[in-house]
Amino acid sequence: MQIAPSPLNEAARLCFLESLNILDTPAEETFDRITRLASVLLDVPMALVSLVDTNRQWFKSRQGLDVSETGRDVAFCAHALHAEDILVIPDAIADPRFADNPLVTGGPRIRFYAGVPLRFAGELSVGTLCVLDTRAREVSATELAHLRDLARIVEREMLHRSLAIDSGSVMREAEQGALMSSEARFHRVFDNSPTSKALVSLDGCILEPNRELCLLLGKRREWLVLTRLDQLIDPQDQAKLTAPWQQVIAGELDSLVAEIRFVTPENPALWCELSVSALRNAQGRAEQLVVFVRDISERKRRQQQLQRYQATLEQQVALRTEELARSQETLQAIADNIPVLIAQIGTDLEYRFNNAVYRQVFGMEPTQLRGRKVQDVLPEPVYQQLLPYFHMALAGERVEADNVRYNPDDPRIWHASCVPDVRHGQVEGFFVMSQDVTERKRKEKSLLDQATLDALTGLPNRAALHKVLDDALQQRAAFALFFIDLDGFKQVNDQHGHEAGDQLLQVAAQRMLAIVRDADTVARLAGDEFVVIALTVANPASAQDIARKLCETLSAPIRVAHADVTVGASIGVYLNQAEGDLLTAEEVLRLADKAMYQAKRNGRNRFTLVPGRQVFDPGL
C-alpha cells in the first residue's frame, strides 16, 4: 500500500482548513443534499465530503458509510489532493497503490473511487467530494462533469459558511446567497441530465421533473409539479407499483422496476420502464423518491409486431392446412414459398404434409415423406431431442424447441414451434414450423464472446474467470489456482513498443494453453496478469509440477518485433482441497495474488504457495 505524500504547501493548507471552522461540526443538510445527489447521479452507494486533516480524513457529509473518519495513511482522498482535476480509480484491486489497502481488502471493500479536490485560492486543497462503489466500473465524461459541478457547489458552501461565521451581521444574507447558488447549480445538473427523471414525494406527488421528462410526457414543468404520479399512469398498470412503492419507502426493497403506460392527452399510451429508489436522511428514513423513466415504446411495438406476425403465420398455416382436402395444390404452392420448414404430423407421429423446404434440408421430395414415421426421417439424436416437445403438442400445449440441427451436414440452426392441430375440440396432431435462426445465434455468440473473452489474447476475461471460479468454489471442487505475473514485461514494452508487448502476451497465452488440459481454464485478468485453474489438482506435488512447467515455458525466449526477448513468471499458487470454510472468488484471488508478490520478493521467475500451507520456492 502506498501512502500519499503531503502536498508541498501542507502547512498553509492545514492553516486554511482550520480557518474554515468546519472540522468536527455536526452534519448539515446543505452538504448532505449534495452527497445524496452525487450518489444518485453517478449511481453509486457511497458519496462523501472528505476533509484531510493532519493525521486523518474527516467526513463533513457521508452517504452509505457508517464511520465519520479514517486514518490519513489509508485515505484515497489524500492521493486526490495531488490531482490537477479529478482522481479516478476504476478498479482499486488492479491499482498497486490501493490493492492491499485495508479499505479495499476489508470493509467497506472499495473497488471504485472518483474524487474532485476541494481547492481554494487556486492551490490550497483541503479535501474532496468523492464517490465510491464496491464494484469496479467505468465512469462517463457526463458523470465526471456532474461531479465537478457538485464539487464547486461544496467549495462555495464551505466558503460562505466560513464567511458567515466570521461576519455575524451578514450571516443570513450569506447563507441565503449560498443556498440560492447551491439550488441553482442543483437545478442545472438535474435538469440537464440526458435521462428522464423526477424527484417525487413519498405520497407520489411530483416535486421536481427535469427537462427530459417534460419533453417525454409533452407537458410543461408547471403542469407536472404537484401532479400525482399515479394520475399519469394507466389504471391497469397502477397495481404494479402499489406494494413495491411502500416496500422501497420502508427499506425492504432497494429499488423497484416496472413496465407501465403513461397516459396523457398527447400520448394515449406511452410504454415506459419506471425505476424508483429512495433518498434517505442520516437516520435512514426515506425523505424523497427518485424516479427514472425510460421510453420502451419502440421495444413494445416490436414485440407486439412480432406476436402479430407469429399469430398471423400460425393462422395462415392452420387455414391452409384445413383447405388441404379442397385444394392441396394451392396449399403446397403457398407453403413452398414461405422460407420456413412446415409440416403437419399426426397423432401416431407420421408426416401428413411437408413443404418444399424439406427438399432443401433433407434432400427428399415432400410427397415421399407423407405417411412416413418421423423417427424414420430425422436423425436419431434430433428425434430424441424433439420427442418430448411432440408429446407436449399432442397433449394440447404449444411449445418451442431451440438449437435444432436437422442435418449433421447442414450448419444451419433452427427454432421449431409445435402447435396443436385442434379440430372439433380434439387434438388430431400438430404443426411444426421451423425458422432458420443461424444468423441470430451467430450474433448472440458474438455478443457473448465480446462480454466474456479478452480481445487481445482470446482467453476468458475477468468476468468469465469469476464465473468458473465461483462455480468451482460452490461445488467444493478440488483445484489449484495459479496467479501469474510476467516479470520484465514493462521493459519489453518500453524497449520494443506496445505492439511487441501485445505479441508477447499473445505468445504467452498460447504457451500456457499448450501445457494445460482441455478441462483447465487459462484467463487473462488484466495487463500482464493471468490466472490458470487446474481442476482435480489437490496435492502440493502436482501443483508444484504445473507451476514449474509454467515458469519454464514462460521464461523461454520469445521472438517479437525482430528481436528475441526473455521474461519470467512470478506465480502465486492456491490449493482448494474441498474442505474447510467456503471462500469467495475475490478472497481466493487475493490470497494467490499475495503469494505471487512473495515470489517476486524472493527473486522472481519462481512460485510460492499461499501462506499457511507448504511453500514451494525452488529459486528458478
Image: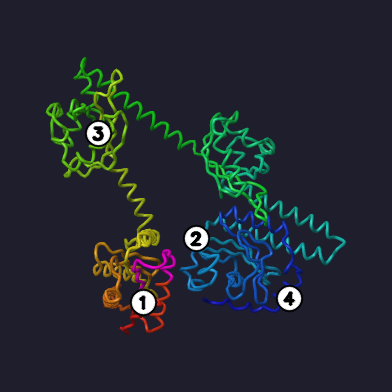
Nearer-N-terminus badge (3/2) = 2
Q: Quadrant of residue 245?
A: top right
Q: CA distance from mark 2 to mark 1?
A: 28 Å
Q: Nearer the viewer, mark 3 or mark 2?
A: 3
Q: CA distance from mark 3 to mark 2?
A: 46 Å
Q: Quadrant of residue 461?
A: bottom left
Compared across the picture, whether 207 is left or right of 555 comes to right
Residue corresponding to mark 1: 609
Residue corresponding to mark 4: 15
Percent coordinates x, y for residue 10 in the rendering? 67, 78
Amino acid type, residue under disc 1 in the picture: Leu
**Residue 588 lies in magenta, yes or no?**
yes
Percent coordinates x, y for residue 356 in the rendering? 19, 29
Amino acid type, residue under disc 4 in the picture: Cys
Percent coordinates x, y for residue 319 in the rendering? 29, 20
Amino acid type, residue under disc 3 in the picture: Phe
Query: Bounds of the magenta span?
Result: 570-590
Q: Residues within 10 Å of mark 2 (few under 14, many from 20)?
A: some
User: SS at mark 3?
Assistant: helix
Q: Please give the name of the residue rendered at 73% of the width and 76% of the height, measured from the top-left corner.
A: 15
Amino acid type, residue under disc 2 in the picture: Arg
Residue corresponding to mark 2: 135
Residue corresponding to mark 3: 390
Q: CA distance from mark 3 to mark 1?
A: 55 Å
